[in-house]
Image (spheres, rainbow, N blue to C red):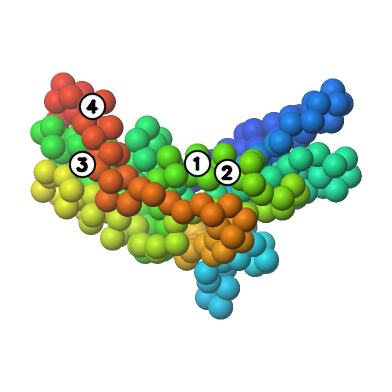
Amino acid sequence: MQSFEDPVGTFQTNVIGTLNLLEAIRQTGTDPVIQVCSSSEIYGQVRETDIPITEDVPFYPVNPYGVSKLAIDRLSFQYFQSYGMKTVITRAFPHTGPRRNPAFAESSFAKQLVEIEQGGDNTVTVGNLDSVRTFLDVRDMVDAYWQATEKCDFGNAYNIGSEIPITINELLSRLVDLSHANVSIKKDSSLLRPKDAPNHVPDMTKFKERTGWEPKIPLEKTLIDLLNYWRDRISAYDVKQ
C-alpha cells in the first residue's frame, strides 16, 4: 500500500539505492557476492495456468513496489552480464515473524488482537481477505538468503518462500484461534490497494535443487511468535479504549 502512496520514494529507495550500491562496488573494484532482494511482486497478475510460479513466468507487476523490484532484479542481471559482478537474485515471496511492521496485514491483525486481549475495542479492521498468499517464517528466509550466497549461480534468480497457500481470511482466522480475543471484523476500504495480485504461490524447485534448503518453522509457530512479540510490546496502558 505504501508504494501507491509514495511511488517516488519507493523508486528512490529500491532502484536508486540499489544502483548506487552496484556502482560503488563496480567503481571501487571490490569483488563481493551480492545478494539482491527482489520480490514475488514482480510477477504481479499471474495467470492460473502459471501457478505455482516458476522463475520463467512473465512479469506483470501491478504496483509501484513490484515495478521497482523488477528494475533492480534486471539491473542486477545486467551488472553480472556487463561487469561479471557476483549477483544472486532472490525473489522473496511473503515472509513474516516477530518484529514484523504492522503495516503488513498479518502483523496488523496480531497487534490488534493483542490490543483486544489487553482490554481494547474488540474490532479487527481489515482490507482484502480474499487474496491467496504463502507465508514463510522470516528466520527460514534469512537462512535461505545465506544459502543463496553460498550455493547459487551468479546472475541467476531464485524463488524463495513457502509452498503452502492460504487466504488472508484463513490467516486471520488462525490468529484469532491462537489469541484469547473475541472479535468482530470490520472492513476498511482505505486498506484496499488500487490493484492487487490475487494468487501468489511459488515453485521453488530451482532453489531447492541448487541448495538443498527446506523451511523448518511451521506457520503456527510463526503466528504464535508474532502474537507473543506484540504481547511483549503492548501493555493494557498502551491500549486505546
Judge whether residue 186 can be spotted in this image.
Answer: no
Mark 2 element type: helix
Residue sitting at x 18%, y 48%: 178
> Mark 2 near mark 1, Cβ–Cβ under 8 Å?
yes
Sequence-first disc among 4 and 2: 2
Sequence-first disc among 1 and 3: 3
Sequence-first disc among 4 and 3: 3
Q: CA distance from mark 4 to mark 2?
A: 31 Å
On-image quarter of the C terminus:
top left
Q: Is residue 217 left or right of residue 144?
A: left
**Circle 4 or circle 2, nearest the eye:** 2
Q: Which residue is mark 4?
A: 232
**Circle 1 or circle 4, nearest the eye:** 1
Amino acid type for the residue under numbered disc 1: Asp
Numbered badge on residue 113: 3
Q: Which residue is mark 1?
A: 143
Residue sitting at x 28%, y 46%: 221
**Horizontal and vertical percent position of residue 5:** 54, 41
Between 224 and 124, the residue placed more toward the observer is 224
Looking at this rendering, what residue extends furthest in the bottom direction?
A: 49
**Circle 1 or circle 3, nearest the eye:** 1
Label 2 Cα neighbours within 10 Å, binned few <14 / some 14-19 / many ≥20: some
Q: CA distance from mark 2 to mark 3?
A: 35 Å
Label 4 Cα neighbours within 10 Å, binned few <14 / some 14-19 / many ≥20: few
Residue sitting at x 64%, y 47%: 151
Residue sitting at x 43%, y 51%: 215
Mark 1 element type: helix
Mark 3 element type: helix
Q: CA distance from mark 2 to mark 1?
A: 6 Å
Label 1 Cα neighbours within 10 Å, binned few <14 / some 14-19 / many ≥20: some
Q: Which residue is mark 2?
A: 147
Sequence-first disc among 2 and 3: 3
